[in-house]
Each structure stands twice: as structure tokens, then as C-alpha cells.
Image (cartoon, rainbow, N blue to C red):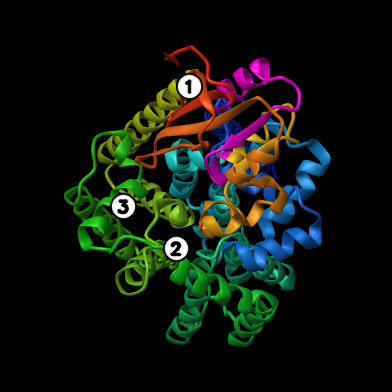
Amino acid sequence: MTEVNSSEKITSKKCNLEYLWLGIVLLIAAIFRFAYLNQVSYWFDESFTLKMVEFPLLDMMERNMHDDDNPPLYYLTLKLWVSLFGNYLTAPRILSALCSMTTVAGTYFLVKEAYQTSSDSRPKPDSRYAALLAAVLVSLSPLQISWAQQVRMYAMAPTFAVWSSYFLFRAMFRKNSGKGSWILFTLLSVLQAYTHYFGLFIAIAQYGFALGYVGYQRLNPREKKVSLQTVLISGITFYFLFLPWLLVFLEHRERVDVKMPTADITWPYIGTRLAMSFDLQWFYSVTPVTGVLVAQFFLIVFLMLAIQRRPADYFLILTTLLPFLAAAIVSLYMRTVFVPRYLISAQVFALISIAVAVSNIPWKLFRRTGILLVLMAMGWLAKEQFLTRTLNASLPGMRGAVTYLNDQREVDETVIVCNPMLFTSIVFYIDDRDQLFTQGTPRGYPYFQGTAVMRDDEYLQISELKNQSHTRIWTFDADKWFGHTWMVNLPPGWHEVSRKRFQEFNADFIIRCYEHQPPNQVATDVL
């Protein structure tokens, strides 16, 4: 009895120590994700998202279905979030940061759950280290950090991916797991597809793994039985829960194919994007050769996993490879979708693969050396991302430009913006929206430049200036933005009297003031 109590105390202490380390990992994750959350200005994708959720619910869903190309779950969640906490700069970004923190925690619990034995619910000794190492790698990944600091759905997608996988392993390998784990797996798997369409690839990998294990257990009758009927019921439920959005998904795909041009894809392009999917651009300039080296590195990692012949190893290989291969095939034969942010969930499983492979090295010296090397490498990348974030936070950018405009502009003076993409960001900083317009008409811009969240009364044709009595107008222009200069061209009779430039991480913003009567002043460019 004494030995049993002593063993239980040791186990309890080990668990407490593990959770203490997990708490430290989450603290590290929070430091990187909440750094300068308020100082860096919104860019187009974020402000587009925020402007979308400003519309009434039915109007928002209509625009999402027919003018956007993303599934609706993040918009619905964000709309509820801002109704509770407001849409000031920090609050919407906190949602993404918290989702990413949940992903880090989910990574830890997934690895522990996936590598427990079928006969003993306690994890194997190496799985504790693998779980913590995997959580650290995800917490330090610049790709995960970057999207945790932005108002987009990319931080939410991995959350559903890892937690649905966690409940899949509970459902398949826990004794007496019951129906609850299958229900939670199915629900979370559907939610990841409603968050981002690449969640469908993760779901295919998850169900492919489950079906593969059903076939495998016939050859190994001693393994825990997983019912084919249960897997099929879950898959059919997934299909019918996603079915209401399926036609919208097909419409989104058709619109993107027709209206959103992309560059022709090549294998060198895929190689470069593969390297960027694992954050190597933060270390040095990536090339297609870098992508080849990344592919060879993961070939070694997957071989190290495959020789272990454990179900979880094959699961990691499948959930990593399938999204990357699908993205490459679609990009080569249809349109370019090999984009690092689309592959953010697959990156989590890739990082877990590295952690498990290194933790399985049998020789202690080599194992510890491998752990140290991967920690140093990911720590370096996180440090570089943090320094870049610090630099971006120091730039005046969009916020500085609009603050200057608020200070200099008189009440009811018109402001004309050169493009809807910039307009969507300006509205969240300017004091008076009433006289803020984008030049032109909705038909003058492609849908991917923000027209889905623009109202008709937010456009102003330059010819309409003849009917206005104002003697002074402000314009908001951009230089070096997407490699071009974007400028509002006023008709004859309007003369530039002042100009001020504000540097942003992706462009220079220029505030110009025009007066209708010819001035005897020369515009100066204040840098």
C-alpha cells in the first residue's frame, strides 16, 4: 500500500512539473503573440475583415457568400467578439492571439494523447518530452506568431485542427472513450472546414487515417477495435454538416478562378514557398534550392517516424504531406494556392513531426543535441520576427498618417482615398467618416481590392467635385504599394498646397492637400 501511494505521489509530481513547463511555454507564446499588438497599424486584410463584420448579420452573410471567397465561421465569431469587446485595434487581434495560444496548448495534449499505449493510459516516457518540445516549436514559429497578431482566420484554423485530432485519438485509442470523443472530433473537424477551406485537406487526412487504421487492425486483432461503422457515420455527418455551404464553396472557387489573376506556377516557385512555409525567410533569402533542402529534411524526419510503426507517426506524415501535396497539385494544374498562410495548420503537424522524431533518437547525447539544435533554430527565427515587428511598430504608418489628417483637416472637409484597400483601413482611425470617400465607382475595381465591404455611398466620382462648394480637399495616396504608385488625380483647378509622407512597413502613405484657387506656393515633401 505504501509503495502504491509512493508511486502515485511520484506520478503526481511529474504531472505537476509537466504542467509547470507547459505554463512556461504558454507564457513564452503570449510574450511573442501580444508584442506590439496595438502599435502596428491595420493592413488591408485585417481592415477588410473588420469592415465586413460591421454590417448587419444578414447583409454580412450575403456579402460573404457572393462577394468574398472565405468560409463564414471566423466572421461570425469576430462579429460576436467585437459586439462584446469593441473593434478598437487591440481587441480584435486578441481573439487571434488567444486562438494561437490554444493551438500551442492543444499541440501539447495532442502529442501526449497520440503516443499513449493501448494498454496503459499513461504516456510513454519520450512522449512527455516530445509534447513539450512540439509546443515550444509551435509557440516560437514566426508563421504562427505573425497570424496570431492579425485579424484574420489563419490563427483559428490550426486550433480546430489540433483539437479535432486530439479527440480523434481519444475516440480511436482510449478505452471506454464513448461517443463523446467521436462527436467532438466530428464537430471540430467541421468547424475547421468552416474556418478555412484548407481545413478540408486536414479533414481528408484525418478520415483517411481512421479508415486506414480500420484496415490495419484486421491484420492485427490484438489492437483496439475501431468500428468502420463509427468512422463512416462520422464522415457522413461531416459531409451533411458542410453540405449547406458546399454550393457557396463552389461559387467561391469559380469566382477566384475567373476574377483573381495569379502568376503561372512553377516548381521553383513551389520550392521557394515551401521554404517560406517553415519561416526560413527570417534567416536568409530563400531560393528554390532552399525548398529542396527543406523537402529532403522532412524526408528524413518522415523516415524516422515511419520506422517506429506507430499509428500516430503515420498520422503526422499524412496530415503534413497531404495539404502540401494537394496545394502543389492544385497550383500546378489549376491556380496558385501554395501560400504559406493557407498551410498554417499543416505546419503545426510538421513541427510536431520534428519534435517526435528528435525525441525518439535512441542515444541520449544525440537526442539532447538534436533538441538543442531545433530549439536554437526556432528561437533564432522567432527573434528575427520579433525584431521586424519592433521595427514596424516604430514606423508612423497608417495610424500616423490619419492622426496627421485628423489634426489638419477642418470639419466636413472631403478626403478622397486612392483605393478601396486603403479606405478600409483609414475608416478605423479617422475621426469623421462622413466625408471620407474612395475615388471612382465599384465597377472600377476588381472584387479582391475590397469592394465586398464597400457601400455605394462610400465612392465618389471625381466629376462630382464640380457640384461641391469646398475650397479644400485632402487626398490619401500610396507609393511603393504592391510595387506601384497609387494617386487621386483631381481635375483642373485644384492645386496641391501641401504634402506629407508617412512610412509604413509595406508602403509610403502620402497626405496631400489641394485648394481650388491657384496658390503661389510650392508643395513640399516632408519626409
Residue at position x 25%, y 40% in the image: 366
Q: Position of residue 485 (x, y in %)?
A: 39, 37
Residues at marks 3 and 1, CA–CA distance in whole angstroms? 31 Å
Q: Position of residue 361 (x, y in %)?
A: 30, 48
In primary-sequence order, the first of circles 1 and 2 is 2
Considering the numbered disc 3 on the image, is that residue within a helix, a strand or a loop?
Answer: helix
Which residue lies most toward the left here?
A: 289
Residue hosting label 3: 273
Q: In the picture shown, does residue 433 fall above or below 271?
A: above
Q: Residues within 10 Å of mark 3 (few under 14, many from 20)?
A: many
Find disc 2 in the rendering and name its residue: 260
Mark 2 Cα-neighbour bin, 10 Å: few <14, some 14–19, many ≥20: few
Q: Which of the labelled discs sits on residue 300, or is there none?
A: none
Image mark count: 3
Q: Position of residue 464 (x, y in %)?
A: 65, 44
**Disc 1 residue type (three-letter):** Phe
**Image quadrant of residue 102?**
top right
Q: Are marks 1 and 2 in contact (CB under 8 Å)?
A: no
The residue carrying mark 1 is 502
Q: In this rendering, is residue 417 above or below 192? A: above
Are the residues at dot 3 and dot 1 in contact (C-beta closer than 8 Å)?
Answer: no
The crowding category of the residue bearing disc 1, from other C-alpha atoms within 10 Å (few below 14, some 14 to 19, many at least 20), is many
Q: Is residue 414 within the magenta segment?
A: yes
**Chain part drawn in magenta:** 395-422
